[in-house]
Image: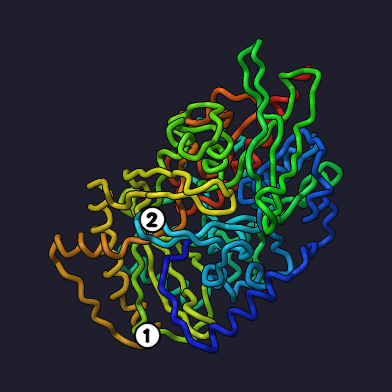
Amino acid sequence: MELPQIKHVHKPLSALFFFLLANLCSSFPPEPQGNRQWHMTSDVNEVAGKSYDYIVVGGGTCGCPLAATLSEKFSVLLIERGGSPYGNPLVIDKRHYGLPLLLTDKHKSVAQSFTSQDGVGNVRGRVLGGSSAINGGLYSRASEEFVNKAGWDKKLVKEAYEWVESKVVFPPFFLTPWQSVAEFSLLETGILPYNGFSLEHVKGTKISGSIFDEFGKRHTAADILEAGNPKNLTVLLNATVKSIIFHHNGDKNETKAKGIRFIQSNGSLHETHEVYIRESKNSSSGGDVILSAGAMGSPQLLLLSGIGPKEQLKRFNIPLVLDMKGVGQGMQDNPCIAILVDSKPQNRVPDPPQIAGITDDFKIIVEASILPLSINESRVNIAAKVAMPFSKGALELNNTDPRLNPAVKFNYLANENDMEECVKMTKLLYRIARSKSIAFFLGESRENKLTSSEVDLRKFCKKNVRTIYHYHGGCRVGSVVDKHYKVYGVKGLRVLDGSTFSESPGTNPMATLLMLGRYQGIKILREKEQNTR
């Protein structure tokens, strides 16, 4: 996402509006979009006790294209802890960009808030479509270097990107006044060359794609489910997975995922239901449980299921399935600094980013937006992130309730390289904020005072670092899963989402996560076809 954390203003009228709007949106029925044919339900009894070829846990950015692709040949259950995005204006309408992050509650809101142990506020998507339903919608592919490091098939990556883009990505029909100003201010500051419209991760200033269409309507990852086979696809909403069901074969010394246990998201933790992977005569051609619950949810679920550091599991009396030190390790978030360029809040319409400035040898990425503080106030800001941080943290369990957040610490700016980059990007942001283009847009000339003291800049970074919502890690490739995203030491279990990344793939991870769902879905289909020959 591209929403720098900004403290919002509380006013009695705004608070009343938010209360009414939150209750209105939480009461929306799961309305279909278009001519939806795949089965979507919140009734756990419709799926409890049944068997499917694949169970995908998490109907988010990666889970939706994965489920759609697998359903072409196999029966798929996609289970999502949140509700439907359809019919919810907070999700669909571009004019409400940013408001879901101000309207969070414990169990029902489309965004679930958490504060890392660093003291930095953050959010997780909790709705079908995941964070693609609440983010800034900016769509930009991964860098070529990222694809090379991942060892992916470049031809299939390209095809997977194009498949996604044909369904939910739109070119700029026009730029809003503020995005045009942002574009000129980046060029004025020397973020060159100018690349115009581009979906690629290229040095300089560019206009990115968007999941908002020309009418200001958001198209989330959930829309990609339309491409699936409706006869094979079932989507269960408002259901939270509690743990994975395993079977241990003593003769082969083999542990295999056989299904999942889940609860209603707003129900009792003790009212547990089960669903299973369909038995196959050929064990090598059986299906999988695939975790796509995100960088917070997937490592949390492995731990709750008994896969992780045994010392941690022992503290919560969780039976050990596999002692795996890497679960929850290598958590990273891209340090972000945001500068407010207007002198006071205004009643401007929220405006998500569409311009990206990529500079300092791809190490700094700049975006700009207008963020809501309340229903009638917003602020204009420019934000930058350290694209490839060195600092790493860890995730651990807080409790055994899967609906609650685990504990996570990202260790922002702990590494000296990250601090140096933060100082550098803070200087850049202030140069952009003093540009003539922004002064003209605001109708005011502001002298943004920036101390030249290196010590003061470091203190500024430490005090003002925040998230840009691109956190990742916890189930990294090579540590928890292999290059096929299969969990080491367990049959029939994969993880496929941002938790497997060791770095953020470019400007915004959404495009690559959408692509990865399609890409790996195709790889699994091809693998199964080979096994049945």
**Residue 461 in picture, x, y percent from top left:** 26, 61
Residue ID for mark 1: 344
**Coordinates of residue 203 in the picture (x, y in percent):** 39, 52
Q: Residue furthest top?
A: 251
* Vertical position of residue 15 compared to residue 263: above or below: below
Q: Is residue 37 visible?
A: yes
Check disc 2 and report its element: helix, strand or loop. Answer: strand
Rendered location of residue 184, percent (x, y): 39, 71
Q: Position of residue 59 (x, y in %)?
A: 66, 50
| Neighbourhood count class around disc 1 (C-alpha, 10 Å): few under 14, some 14–19, many 20 upward | few
| SS for callout 1 | loop
Q: Which residue is mark 2?
A: 358
- Image quadrant occupied by the C terminus: top right
Amino acid type at image mark 2: Ile
Give the mark, 1 or 2, whose residue is nearer the N terminus: 1
Residue depicted at 73% across the width and 65% down the height: 86
Q: Nearer the viewer, residue 361 or 450?
A: 450
Q: Amino acid at mark 1?
A: Lys
**398 and 316: which one is in front?**
316
Q: Is residue 458 left or right of residue 152?
A: left
Task: Measure how far apart labels 1 and 2 are at the Cα level.
Answer: 28 Å
Residue at coordinates 64% horizontally, 47% vertically from top-left?
58
Badge number at residue 482: none
